[in-house]
Image (cartoon, grey):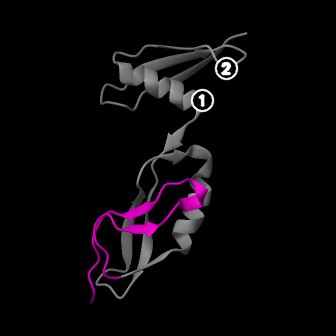
């Protein structure tokens, strides 16, 4: 028995309407509706191992700011988002912080760091 999943591709601005078809084993996967190769890659990844980037803020001490914008350096498994957010909520950065500084190393055991997306200077 085949399973069809309908998706809107987010790999480029075209937003192709994809149909991803898998068999019972989950090994034979086909993607249709994509205009470019990125759509096929996205469709397969989304049904086999979905990932997301996480963006948020953390508290910052000793700065002219009260919060610091952060994001995961790369995407993480979708199932780890809530674990990632728990660590981000508990995190506090100490000024000074530069753009790209690691705020949380290996967040939620994903192997991905949470980095600053803006500097925070000392008061």
> Number of marks in the image?
2
Q: Residue 21's quadrant in the figure?
A: top right
Disc number for residue 26: 2
**What residue is shown at x 67% (from left), y 20% (from top)?**
26
Q: Which of marks 2 and 1 is nearer the N terminus?
A: 2
Q: Which residue is drawn at 57% across and 44% down?
A: 78
Residue 52 drawn in magenta: no
How crowded pointer 1 is (Cα within 10 Å; few <14, some 14-19, many 20+) is rated as: few
Q: Do the residues labelled 2 and 1 touch (CB within 8 Å)?
A: yes
Q: Mark 1 points at which residue?
A: 48
* Residue at 71%, 17% in the rendered image: 25
Q: Residue 66 carries which label?
A: none
Of the 4 image quadrants, the one containing the C terminus is bottom left
Q: Is residue 74 above or below residue 92?
A: above
**Residue 8 visible somewhere in the drawing:** no
The location of residue 19, given as percent across then percent down, is 52, 16
Q: Main secondary structure of the magenta part?
A: loop
In this view, the residue in front, 100 or 80, is 100
Residue 5 location, x and y as percent? Answer: 58, 21
Residue 114 lies in the magenta stretch: yes
Query: In terms of depth relative to the viewer, which is nearer, 65 or 109?
Result: 109
**Helix, strand, or loop for circle 1?**
helix
**Which residue is depicted at the point 38% across and 75% down?**
67
């Amino acid at each position: 028995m085949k399973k069809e999943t309908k998706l809107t591709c987010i790999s480029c601005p075209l937003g192709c309407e994809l149909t991803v078809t898998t068999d019972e084993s989950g090994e034979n996967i086909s993607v249709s509706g994509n205009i470019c190769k990125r759509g096929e890659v996205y469709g397969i990844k989304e049904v086999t191992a979905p990932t997301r980037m996480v963006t948020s803020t953390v508290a910052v001490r000793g700065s002219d700011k009260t919060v610091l914008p952060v994001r995961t350096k790369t995407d993480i498994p979708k199932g780890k988002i809530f674990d990632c957010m728990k660590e981000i909520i508990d995190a506090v950065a100490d000024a000074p912080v530069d753009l790209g500084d690691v705020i949380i190393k290996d967040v939620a055991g994903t192997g991905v760091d949470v980095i600053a997306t803006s500097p925070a200077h000392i008061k």
